[in-house]
């Protein structure tokens, strides 16, 4: 038996800033049309994975893109859209003054800082009040202890990377760069994970 409840982690659907490669961080950007479809697809995948999906706990980051993803996925599987909890600790890490920029723009405007981040993505803190993955991991770690039953978490790519490092012991170097897919379900069981 797993040491903790299973987590069904769903990254929010695509936004226009995702499409443009912009760093969203804590900017409250809504889903685009593809993102809405991805949210519904994630719901269908979840329904196929968990026969008693209505018995799961449902928790989302309070940001607009995650709330809309949660509501669309719940509606897609026949649950009341608004019946879920919010947890502030699930908010995306902030990129500080880099938010709204693309990585290409960051590399052009602040090449030395971009190189420093590439050398140690996990621990690098972006300028202007940014947050490192290490700081994010400290913020989300207590969530694992708070889980009392199998749970659907709708949050962000950075948060998923932090969970993989904290819950599954993925190396911080690998976790900081792993692709987190939209429209799919990241199943975290004990210390293992898989995509569904």
Image (cartoon, rainbow, N blue to C red):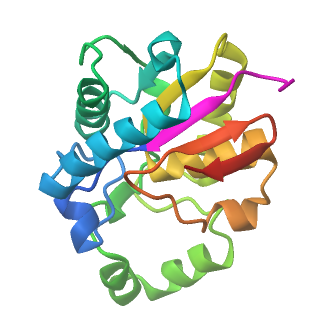
Residue 49 location in percent, x, y?
54, 35
Q: State the predominant SS element of the stretch in magenta.
A: loop
- The answer, for residue 177, to whether it is visible in the render is yes
- Direction from residue 87 to residue 104 in the image, left or right: left
Q: Nearer the viewer, residue 196 or 190?
A: 196
Tell me the residue at 36%/79% (across/down): 106
Q: Is residue 134 above or below residue 149?
A: below
Q: Nearer the viewer, residue 21 or 188?
A: 188
Tell me the residue at 66%/14% (across/down): 146
Residue 103 location in percent, x, y?
37, 78
Within the image, what quadrant is residue 117 found in? bottom right
Q: Nearer the viewer, residue 93 or 169?
A: 169
User: Within the magenta stretch, is there residue 97?
Assistant: no
Q: Is residue 172 above or below residue 21?
A: above
User: Within the magenta stretch, is there residue 5?
Assistant: yes
Residue 97 location in percent, x, y?
33, 60
């Amino acid at each position: 038996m797993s040491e903790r409840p299973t987590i069904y982690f769903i990254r929010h659907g695509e936004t226009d800033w995702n499409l443009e490669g912009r760093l969203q961080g804590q900017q409250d950007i809504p889903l685009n049309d593809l993102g809405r479809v991805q949210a519904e697809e994630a719901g269908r995948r979840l329904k196929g994975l968990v026969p008693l999906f209505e018995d799961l706990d449902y928790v989302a980051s309070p940001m607009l893109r995650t709330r809309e993803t949660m509501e669309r996925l719940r509606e897609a599987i026949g649950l009341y859209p608004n019946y879920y909890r919010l947890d502030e600790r699930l908010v995306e890490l902030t990129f500080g003054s880099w938010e709204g920029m693309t990585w290409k723009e960051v590399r052009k405007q602040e090449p030395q800082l971009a190189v420093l981040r590439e050398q140690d993505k996990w621990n690098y803190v972006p300028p202007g009040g940014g947050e490192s993955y290490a700081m994010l991991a400290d913020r989300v770690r207590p969530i694992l202890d708070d889980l009392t039953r199998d749970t659907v978490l709708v949050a962000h790519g950075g948060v998923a990377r932090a969970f993989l490092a904290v819950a599954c012991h993925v190396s911080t170097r690998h976790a900081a760069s792993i692709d987190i897919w939209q429209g799919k379900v990241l199943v975290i069981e004990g210390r293992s994970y898989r995509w569904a």
